[in-house]
Amino acid sequence: MKVGSLQLVVAVLALATALTVAYDPAILQDFCVAVKDRTSPDSVFVNGIACKNPSLATIDDFTHSGLNVPRDTNNKIGANLTVVDTTVIPGINTLGINLVRIDLAANGGLNPPHEHPRASEILIVVEGTLYAGFVATNPEHRLFAKVLGPGDVIVFPVGLIHFQYNIGKTPGLAFAALGSQNPGIMSIGNAMFGAQPPIMGEMLAKAFQLDKKVVAGLQSKTWINPEGDN
Ligand SMILES: *[C@@H]1O[C@H](CO)[C@@H](O)[C@H](O)[C@H]1NC(C)=O
């Protein structure tokens, strides 16, 4: 390879690395209130999302109520997550933040192992006794976990698998803030055993050192997402 083309390859790789830093871009305006109607003459596009004409923005675009209301945790995992994103608070668009109310049933309500591809998370426990933690990457898979009570705060680094499990005898409540307006949620069990169309069972059996029948059983289960309606 000639020196010139090697330098070009290095320059292209450096540029690609710079462009793929996976955080929300810094915003160049105070706000960009999301509007559903992308064809409206009042809308402009910023990062692919139509924004309301700023002169038409009101305080209602930046507020939301009802996060004080407990959610129904009467489901298989005993959890209900209320996500505050652009669909409920349009003014959050382009600001790189997001909020979640987490309700966990008494005696075992669980926010199952999951990860957020685009955000770190900071969570504060308000009620309950939560066994919460995350696992670091290969090769050690070090576990960082602890039992938390009201007022305790934990941080989950971006992309790492984490969980909260209410081991207390009373309902659990936590609020979490995430560093993206669209963090994404990848529930591990759901992704592996509830994928549609299903992942090849033989492959999963080998990957998880399981009997094929066990895999078939897991794939036949219903894998619910804990995020409820807003
Ligand atoms: C969460 O709670 C709301 C209302 O309390 C309910 O409509 C919704 O179905 C619940 N979601 C889950 C996943 O149970």
Image (spheres, rainbow, N blue to C red):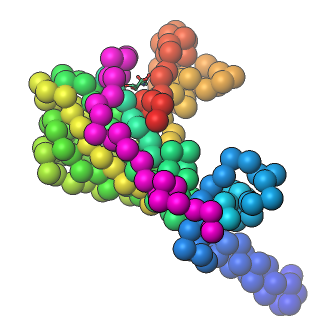
Label tally: 0
- Kindly identify the residue that appears in the image at 47 percent across and 59 percent down: 59
Q: Is residue 38 left or right of residue 187?
A: right
Q: Quadrant of residue 30?
A: bottom right
Q: Main secondary structure of the magenta part?
A: loop
- Kindly identify the residue that appears in the image at 37 percent across and 54 percent down: 177
Q: Is residue 68 left or right of residue 220?
A: left
Which residue occupies the foreground of this view, 218 or 64?
A: 64
- x, y percent for residue 186: 51, 40
- x, y percent for residue 56: 62, 63
Residue 42 drawn above or below residue 109: below
65 is within the stretch colored magenta = yes
Residue 114 drawn above or below residue 16: above
Which residue occupies the foreground of this view, 135 or 156?
A: 156
Extreme residue in the bottom direction: 3
Report the quarter where the N terminus lies.
bottom right
Q: Quadrant of residue 69?
A: top left
- Kindly identify the residue that appears in the image at 28 percent across and 31 percent down: 70
Residue 117 in sight:
no
In which quadrant of this rendering is ligand 1 seen?
top left
Q: Is residue 143 left or right of residue 196?
A: left
- x, y percent for residue 84: 45, 46
Which residue occupies the foreground of this view, 30 or 164?
A: 30
2 is within the stretch colored magenta = no
Residue 146 in sight:
yes
Residue 25 drawn above or below residue 73: below
Stretch of the chain drawn in magenta = 54-77
Which residue occupies the foreground of this view, 174 or 63?
A: 63
- x, y percent for residue 196: 66, 24
